[in-house]
Structures are given as C-alpha cells and as structure tokens.
C-alpha cells in the first residue's frame, strides 16, 4: 500500500552551502542538494525544493512530493531507485532574476551530474525541462513521450506534480510517463 514518506536529504557540498553567486543566497534559509538515494540510477529533476518543513520546522511530505512518490510507486519504483534534485538548490521566497539564478544553479547540477553519473533523468515541469535541456522553448506538452540525450544521459519530461494536483485530468498522462521511464529502465 502506498504511503508517502519524508525522503532523506543529500547534504550539499560546502561550496554550494556558501554560494553567493545569485540573489537567492540572500533569501534562502538553506541549500537542499537533493533527496532520496544520491547514488540512484534515476534522477527526477524539479524546479526547486519547495517546502519540506511546516512552520515549526517539522519535516512533512508536501503535495508535490506526495504526487511524485505516488507516481513512482505506481510505476514500480522504490525510494532507493530514485534521486530527486533541483534546478535551484534553494526555495525562492520572493521575486528574483529567474534566468540568471537558473543558469548559475545549473552549474551546480552539472557538477552534481558529473559526480553521480545518473543512468537516466526525468524532468518534471517546464522550468526543469528548459533548464536541464538548455532550451528556453522546451515544453512538456510537446516533449512528453520522447527521449533525448543530455550530456550522455537519456532524458524525458513530464508534468510537474503540482500541476497534476491542480489539474487531476493530467494524472493519467503523468502515470503514463512514469511507466515509460520504468519500461526504459527495464522495470516495466
């Protein structure tokens, strides 16, 4: 039976914790490098880490993570199979220069990718797809169901879990995309 859980965080490297290259450094409370299994073969890429704690600082599973974990479960993945990482390594709290911050943070992701060498990647949402694919015109609706190589990593895209929560009619497509990843990886 599916039960959402708080996945363990992957501690960020010291240089990322002290990064001051973009204005997000002035509004963040911390850097979230990733969560799940840092050595997992499959990377799930989101735009930013979002909420992980309530107002009192207690960890909880937000709606985005519940939807993501549900789809992973339905596709036959275990937590150990997946690593969730982000274009932005901290949660934005107010307006910021999005193109600049994303470009700077993508350098962190490229270093992370070189160190971990994922076997495949699933970008969730337009921001993740545009940033990871390095294509400002990338669009989930047109790229769903296709695979492309990004720095040697087979990559596909799907809807952002929050979009799926807001528009439940997207859930069948979201699950289809996760099953496609499972089949590509040999789980389906």
Image (cartoon, rainbow, N blue to C red):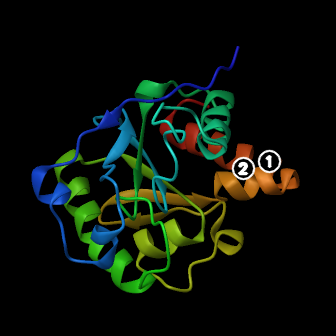
Number of residues whose C-alpha sits closer than 10 Å to that of mark 2, classed few (under 14), some (14–19) or many (20 or more): many
Furthest toward the right, the residue is 169
Q: Residue at x 72, y 43 (%)?
A: 175
For the image, the number of numbered tags is 2
Counting from the top left corner in percent of width and height, residue 156 is at 54, 59
Return the residue nearer the eye: 51 or 55.
Answer: 55
The N terminus sits in image quarter: top right
In the visual, does 105 lie left or right of 42? left
Q: In which image quadrant can residue 20 be found?
A: bottom left
Q: Residue at x 20, y 76 (%)?
A: 21
Counting from the top left corner in percent of width and height, residue 4 is at 61, 26
Return the residue nearer the eye: 19 or 188.
Answer: 19
Number of residues whose C-alpha sits closer than 10 Å to that of mark 1, classed few (under 14), some (14–19) or many (20 or more): some
Q: Is residue 184 above or below residue 8?
A: below
Q: Residue at x 44, y 52 (%)?
A: 121
Q: How far apart are the two marked residues, 2 and 1, measured between alpha carbons? A: 5 Å
Q: Residue at x 40, y 79 (%)?
A: 134
Counting from the top left corner in percent of width and height, residue 63 is at 67, 43
Q: Secondary structure at mark 1?
A: helix
Q: Secondary structure at mark 2?
A: helix
Counting from the top left corner in percent of width and height, residue 3 is at 65, 20
Return the residue nearer the eye: 51 or 106.
Answer: 51
Q: Which residue is mark 1?
A: 171
Q: In which image quadrant can residue 76 be found?
A: top right
- Do the residues under discs 2 and 1 have CB atoms within 8 angstroms? yes
């Amino acid at each position: 039976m599916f039960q959402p859980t708080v996945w363990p965080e992957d501690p960020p490297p010291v240089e990322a914790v002290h990064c001051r290259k973009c204005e997000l450094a002035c509004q963040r409370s911390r850097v979230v490098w990733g969560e799940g299994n840092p050595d997992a073969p499959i990377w799930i890429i989101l735009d930013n880490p979002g909420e992980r704690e309530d107002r009192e600082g207690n960890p909880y599973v937000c709606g985005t993570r519940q939807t993501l974990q549900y789809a992973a479960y339905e596709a036959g993945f275990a937590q150990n199979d997946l690593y969730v990482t982000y274009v932005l390594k901290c949660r934005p709290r107010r307006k910021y220069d999005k193109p600049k911050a994303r470009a700077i943070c993508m350098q962190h992701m490229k270093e992370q990718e070189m160190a971990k060498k994922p076997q495949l990647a699933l970008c969730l949402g337009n921001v993740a797809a545009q940033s990871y694919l390095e294509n400002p015109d990338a669009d989930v609706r047109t790229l769903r169901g296709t695979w492309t190589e990004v720095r040697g990593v087979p990559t596909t895209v799907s809807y952002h879990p929050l979009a799926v929560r807001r528009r439940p009619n997207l859930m069948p497509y979201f699950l289809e995309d996760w099953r496609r990843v499972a089949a590509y990886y040999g789980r389906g």
